[in-house]
Image (cartoon, rainbow, N blue to C red):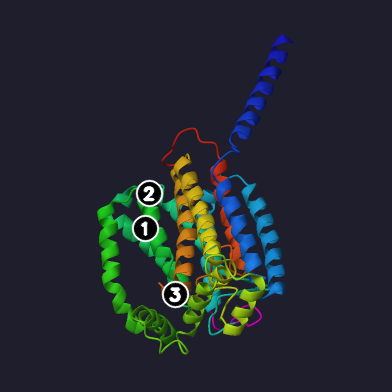
């Protein structure tokens, strides 16, 4: 009898220790709270900015925010290990969605072209943009690859990662969406640095890219060449394009400057935006609306919130207990901040106008929901209690 009691107690202790271990794997005080609150601040600021000229769209964007946060709560509640286990499958499925967009005989009820671009899959009353989700699935797949690829310190290993990255990039360019495609290269560079790639190899590749970039000008589409021509005209003070191909850029710069330091307020800024006929004021050019309504302080608030998001993501990566978690966090932080730089740069006239949206701020359900799912992945990585650093985990 005593032996049976002892065995029963031993089994109970083992079960208790197992429960304690699973509980201890979750940490609730970590740096991912900073990106979470920064993302919430940007989302609410975006809803208010959209409401400047389109209150109905602002209400829909608030609905997207609720859906995004619910999706984030569901994903964040899962064990973080599933990301690495299913990384390549999720990436492959997302690639299949990108291929579906390009199949010409797919009916319009599923893929409806807009302004000559095939970027959205229609799901009932909702639209799904695979190029938004591919950013996350690509980052996770690259992290799974780079954590175990010892030859990342060799030039051939870096070339292999570039070849894998070219698959989503090529499919996105064919939509066509050159702007989103170009975002992958700098993020990959940051992840390779975090993975321990040799700087001299990355410098060689960067120099080759810089040298070859001007050669791509003749093969660009006309509207893409127009954007570059408009930027050059702005730099040299040529105003002849302001009422033609440079209209959007000129209107954005003018309205952003109209806000001054403190902004023009909701009513006046709304009147200015409508009177100047700013194209895409709720999507690509939302930063001009923010600068017009809240002035320089509003623009700085967007940058501070985005910087807080990126800083929190990098701190999550720094404190991650695995190379996989580190690379995921660094990739997410780089992706969000670089997208902000491109969007705000084109709005104030220092970069060519592109279709790049402002993360968390621009109107769009696919973008907002995917960004909140991305934030929940960051939260899941940070929630794993670290017991040292495991290079291969």
* Crowd class of label 1 (few under 14; some 14 to 19; many from 20; radius 10 Å): many
Percent across and percent down for residue 355 are 50, 75
Percent across and percent down for residue 110 are 64, 78
Percent across and percent down for residue 138 are 48, 60
Of marks 2 and 3, which one's residue comes earlier in the chain?
3
Seen at 51% across and 52% down, the residue is 308
Q: Secondary structure at mark 3?
A: helix
Relative horizontal placement of residue 98, taking residue 67 as reference (left or right): left
Which secondary structure class fits the magenta region best?
loop
Of marks 1 and 3, which one's residue comes earlier in the chain?
3
Relative horizontal placement of residue 180, taking residue 75 as reference (left or right): left
Q: Quadrant of residue 40?
A: bottom right
Seen at 55% across and 51% down, the residue is 35
Of marks 2 and 1, which one's residue comes earlier in the chain?
1
Residue 111 is one of the magenta-drawn residues? yes
Relative horizontal placement of residue 140, taking residue 193 as reference (left or right): right
Residue 195: assigned label: 2
Vertical side of 122 occupied by 186: above or below: above
Q: Which residue is mark 1?
A: 189
Percent across and percent down for residue 106 are 59, 81
Q: Which residue is mark 3?
A: 178
């Amino acid at each position: 009898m005593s032996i049976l009691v002892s065995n029963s107690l031993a089994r109970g202790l083992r079960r208790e220790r197992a429960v304690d271990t699973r509980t201890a794997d979750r940490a609730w005080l970590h740096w991912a709270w900073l990106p979470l609150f920064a993302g919430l601040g940007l989302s609410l600021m975006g809803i208010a900015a959209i409401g400047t000229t389109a209150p109905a769209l602002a209400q829909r964007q608030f609905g997207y925010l609720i859906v995004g946060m619910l999706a984030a709560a569901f994903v964040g509640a899962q064990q973080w290990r599933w990301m690495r286990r299913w990384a390549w499958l999720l990436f492959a499925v997302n690639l299949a969605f990108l291929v579906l967009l390009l199949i010409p005989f797919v009916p319009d009820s599923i893929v409806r072209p807009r302004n000559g671009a095939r970027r959205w899959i229609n799901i009932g009353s909702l639209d799904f943009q695979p190029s938004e989700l591919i950013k996350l699935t690509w980052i996770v797949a690259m992290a799974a690859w780079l954590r175990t690829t010892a030859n990342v310190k060799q030039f051939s290993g870096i070339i292999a990662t570039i070849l894998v990255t070219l698959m989503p990039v090529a499919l996105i360019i064919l939509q066509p969406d050159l702007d989103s495609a170009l975002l992958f290269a700098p993020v990959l560079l940051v992840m390779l640095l975090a993975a321990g790639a040799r700087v001299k190899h990355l410098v060689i590749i960067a120099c080759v890219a810089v040298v070859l970039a001007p050669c791509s000008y003749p093969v660009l589409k006309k509207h893409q060449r127009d954007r570059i021509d408009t930027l050059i005209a702005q730099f040299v003070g040529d105003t002849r394009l302001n009422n033609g191909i440079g209209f959007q850029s000129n209107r954005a710069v003018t309205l952003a400057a109209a806000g001054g330091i403190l902004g023009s307020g909701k009513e006046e800024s709304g009147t200015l935006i409508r009177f100047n006929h700013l194209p895409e004021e709720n999507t690509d050019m939302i930063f001009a609306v923010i600068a017009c309504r809240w002035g320089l302080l509003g623009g700085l608030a967007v940058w501070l919130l985005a910087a807080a998001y990126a800083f929190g993501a990098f701190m999550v990566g720094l404190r991650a207990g695995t190379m996989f978690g580190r690379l995921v966090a660094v990739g997410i932080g780089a992706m969000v901040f670089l997208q902000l730089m491109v969007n705000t740069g084109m709005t104030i006239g220092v970069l060519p106008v592109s279709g790049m949206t402002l993360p968390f701020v621009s109107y769009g359900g696919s973008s907002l929901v995917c960004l909140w799912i991305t934030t929940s992945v960051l939260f899941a990585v940070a929630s794993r209690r670290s017991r040292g650093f495991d290079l291969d985990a």
